[in-house]
Amino acid sequence: MTPSEPTPKAKTAKCDRCGAPRARAAKFCGTCGAASREHKTATRAQWSDSAKVDRRHSRAVASVFVGTLGGMLLLALVLGEEGSETQYLLAALAAQLVAGFTALALLGKGAWRASLAGPASVRDLALALPIGALGFAASFVWVESVWVESIFPGAPEFDELAPGLPLLLLGATLVPIVEEWLDRGVLWNALAPLTGRAGQIVLTAMLFALLHGLNGGFVLELPHRFAGGLLLGWLRARSGSLLPSIVAHVTWNALAAAVD
């Protein structure tokens, strides 16, 4: 700057509370500490945007829980006792898909891609195999130790089930993919701005357990399914990907089918 050039004046404003001069870009008054009007306006806008996000995600979470569980119960009532196991399984998958896509519509643009998560490392994919085996082992031990004919009449043992090949393939492939996409894909991302990582793991494990406990075997199903859901959620959190939890779930179901 040459001596002939005038010194530019700093852009100033007055504090709304005490009237002291302050830099126009300052967020707070240097004299009394009051927030500037511009800062208040920007903060209110941020709060409003955050509230909108929270409401949208809360509705998506509700649609997953209410839509999935309500839809499965409704379809069970429609099918009644005459429905086959394959029909029940397909009806449950249909309810989960409807609830999942409803939640994606509520979440808006980018929700579909977010529900699929990112790629997985080879280490996490390798870790998925023992995690799936551990989940199956926990369920096997729990059911075999808790099941008592006098308490749970007609409750199946592992060696009493002999599903046909189509049902076996359905339970070991499509079911894990849809359930993991709904639980640790759609619901996981819907919960992201509402709770911490621990909340995501616990709440997705709750839905995972409820998906398997609606057949009346609450004591038989809910505890070990919830524990398994925690393992799958931990794997999802560790890997940042949906694929390892799918691999673990497929491993779990495949081992169950092999034992059956």
Image (cartoon, rainbow, N blue to C red):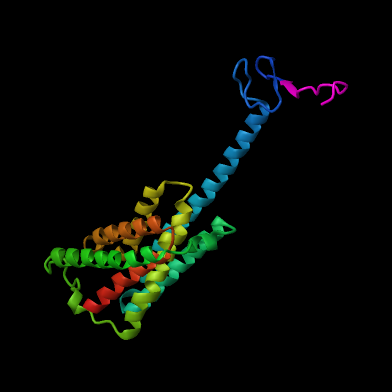
Image-quadrant location for residue 13: top right
Residue 224: in magenta span: no
Most common SS among magenta residues? loop
Image-quadrant location for residue 68: bottom left
The quadrant of the image that shows the C terminus is bottom left
Please tell me which residue is depicted at 35% across the width and 79% down the height of the picture.
86
The residue lying toward the viewer, choosing from 253 and 27, is 27
Q: Would you place residue 178 above or below residue 229 in this image? A: below
The residue lying toward the viewer, choosing from 139 and 4, is 4
Please tell me which residue is depicted at 76% across the width and 23% down the height of the picture.
10
The quadrant of the image that shows the N terminus is top right
**Highlighted range, magenta:** 1-13
Residue 7: in magenta span: yes
Please tell me which residue is depicted at 53% across the width and 47% down the height of the picture.
55
The residue lying toward the viewer, choosing from 150 and 238, is 238
Measuring from the top left, give residue 224's x and y in whole percent: 24, 61
Please tell me which residue is depicted at 62% across the width and 15% down the height of the picture.
31
Q: Would you place residue 22 above or below residue 172 in this image? A: above
Residue 216 visible at all: no
Residue extending farthest right: 4
